[in-house]
Image (cartoon, rainbow, N blue to C red):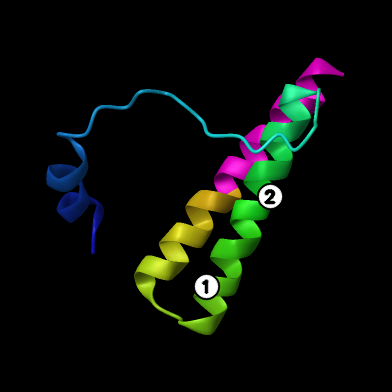
Amino acid sequence: MTTKDLHPLLDPLVDTREVIVVRAGEDDLPLAVWRTAVREARRAYASWSASPGRLAHAAYLAAEDQADAALEGLLLRA
């Protein structure tokens, strides 16, 4: 699937800019966002490893990008 194929599928979706964060007693929201993103990236990697394919790889890369962005947020506040 190419970017050209994805645009017609994704364009109608509304981006609410919401993030679901598992806080599990965590008072530090940016840290909780990063931990959640890392957990999701690990799950995506495991899924891709178990069932290799283009979509699984794309999901892993997207999750890893989110974890990287969350880490940047942590580093910027320091």
The residue that disc 1 covers is 47
Helix, strand or loop for disc 2: helix
Q: Is residue 69 magenta?
A: yes
Quarter of the image with the C terminus is top right
Q: Would you call the spot at circle 2 few (<14 residues within 10 Å), some (14-19), or many (20 or more)?
A: many
Task: Point out the residue furthest to the top here.
Answer: 77
The residue that disc 2 covers is 38
Start and end of the magenta stretch? Answer: 65-78
Residue drawn at x 46%, y 67% is 57
- Percent across and percent down for residue 67 are 64, 44
Note whether 41 is above or below 28 in the view shown. below
Residue drawn at x 25%, y 27% is 14
Instruction: Specify the amino acid type for callout 1.
Output: Ser
Residue drawn at x 60%, y 72% is 46
Toward which corner of the image does residue 68 lie, by quadrant? top right
From the viewer's perspective, is 50 left or right of 35?
left
